[in-house]
Image (cartoon, rainbow, N blue to C red):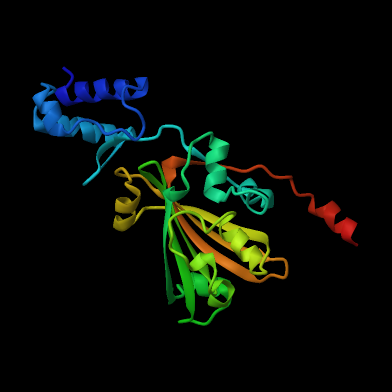
Amino acid sequence: MTPKWRELADKLAEQIRRGDYAPGERLPQIREQVEAGEGSKVTVHAAYKALEAEGLVTSSRGHGTVVRQQVPLKRLGIARYDKAKWLDGDEVAFIADRVASGRAYRRNEQTQSVSLVEAPPEAAAAHGLPAGAQVYARARLVKEGDQPTHTLTSYYRPEHVEGTRLVDPTPGPAGRGGGFRVLYDAGYEIDHMKERVFARTPTADEVRLLQLPQGEPVVELHRTTYTADGTVVEFAIGVHAASRFAWEYDFKVPDSANDSEGRE
C-alpha cells in the first residue's frame, strides 16, 4: 500500500510537471495543505521533502517551498565574452547567458558589495602580489527572478579600478558594457582568459545564499583575465548552483602542429 505522503508527493509532482505550479512559485504552506485535507503535518512535510530530494522544489526558511526552474540556463563558454557584446553593446556576461537561453532578465538581478580587503591567497598569486596586499573585492549575487543562480567575486588591483564604476556598489552591472567596458575605458583592454572549473560540496553559507536543495553540489569557477601584454586585470571566483546551468562551449579545434609551422 502506497504511503499517504508518497501519494501526495506524486500528485504535486504531476501538478508541477503540468505547469499548475510555475517555476519560482511557492507551494501552499504545510498548514494550508493540512486544512485542505491533504494529510497531517507529518504527511505533508514528508511529501515536500520527497519533492526536494527529487529536485522539483527548494525549501528554505523565510522562502517556503518553491518550484525549481526545470530547464537550466545556458552558461556560455567563450561566446559570453565576445567583445561585440560588451564593447559595442550592453550584453554583460550574465545577460549574454540569459539571451542565449531565451530567458528574461533585469539588470538589478545582479547585486553587489565592494570592499577593500586583504587579497585571498589565490587572488594574490594570480595578480603577482605579496601576501597581505590590498585588493578590491567586488562580490556579486545573481538571481533569476527570486531564485539565486550564482555568486561571482572579482578581485582587482586598486590602481586599476580606483575611482571607476567597478568600486560602485549600485545594483546591476557597472554601467553600459559592465566591468570589461570599465577596464577598457581605463586603458586595460582584455585579451585572453584562463578558466578552471570544478565541482564540490557547498558550505552552509552557500546553501543558504543560493537556496540549494539538500545534496546539490556547486560548480566553482576560477577566472583569470589578461591584457595582451599579460597583465592580470581581474581574478574572479564564481560559485554556481550545479543544476541551474548547462555549460556550453563552441570553439575551433586547435591544430598546434600546423600553427607552429606557420609561425616559423
In this view, the residue in front, 93 or 30, is: 93
At 15% from the left and 22% from the top, the residue drawn is: 4
Residue 205 occupies quadrant: bottom left
At 31% from the left and 33% from the top, the residue drawn is: 25
> Count the marks: how many?
0
Q: Quadrant of the C terminus?
A: bottom right
Residue 164 occupies quadrant: bottom right
Outermost residue on the top side: it is 1
At 52% from the left and 75% from the top, the residue drawn is: 124
- Looking at the image, can residue 75 be seen? no
Residue 194 percent location from the top left of the image: 62, 59
Residue 62 percent location from the top left of the image: 22, 46
Residue 36 percent location from the top left of the image: 12, 22
Q: Is residue 260 left or right of residue 197?
A: right
Rendered position, 114 above or below 16: below
Residue 109 percent location from the top left of the image: 43, 48
In this view, the residue in front, 127 or 254, is: 127
At 36% from the left and 22% from the top, the residue drawn is: 19
In this view, the residue in front, 66 or 44, is: 66
Q: Is residue 68 left or right of residue 133?
A: left
Q: Is residue 36 left or right of residue 121?
A: left
Rendered position, 255 above or below 48: below
Q: Quadrant of the N terminus?
A: top left
Rendered position, 206 above or below 155: above
- Looking at the image, can residue 199 be seen? yes
Residue 66 occupies quadrant: top left
